[in-house]
Image: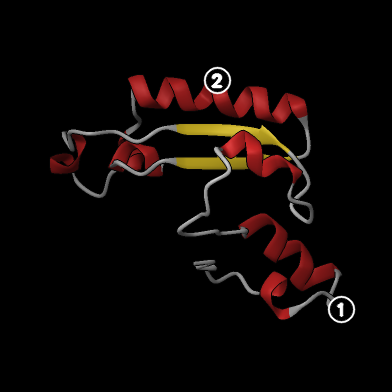
Amino acid sequence: MLALHGIDAYGLEVSQKAVEAGNAYAQIQLSQPSPSNFGSAAGKNLGHRGTIKFVVGDFFKTDWEIDCGGAPFDLIYDYTVSMLCFRHVPMLTPSHSSSAPYFPR
């Protein structure tokens, strides 16, 4: 989880139930992180932790951005959308068909 390493992160999902589950899981991981979140035992004591929030929204619209503070993002990574687009929707723009991070600024 990026938040464990001091980065504020948002998760976008179309399902309200998935958002609720994601927020509950994130809170557990922030208070009692799994070892799999760290590359080494030394990484567990990183000091400042970021925040994490999952929100309901459609990736292809922008109305959900207000739930994320409305500020521009430093990094967008759309792993799930990338995989679906690559396999099932090849006519989408290249920015949606790559699994590489997108730096919007």
What secondary structure is found at the residue carrying circle 2?
helix
Q: How far across and down, in percent of the image, does residue 4 sit? A: 32, 37
Q: Quadrant of residue 42?
A: top left
Q: Label 2 near label 1: C-beta < 8 Å?
A: no
Residue occupied by mark 2:
24
Q: Quadrant of residue 6?
A: top left
Q: Quadrant of residue 99?
A: bottom right
Going by the numbered disc 1, the residue's amino acid type is: Met
Left or right of 78 on screen, residue 51: left
Vertically, is 65 above or below 35?
below
Residue occupied by mark 1:
91
Q: How far across and down, in percent of the image, does residue 55 sit? A: 65, 34
Q: How far across and down, in percent of the image, does residue 3 sit? A: 38, 38
Going by the numbered disc 2, the residue's amino acid type is: Ala
Left or right of 21 on screen, residue 92: right
Question: Which residue occupies 71% across, 70% down?
Answer: 96
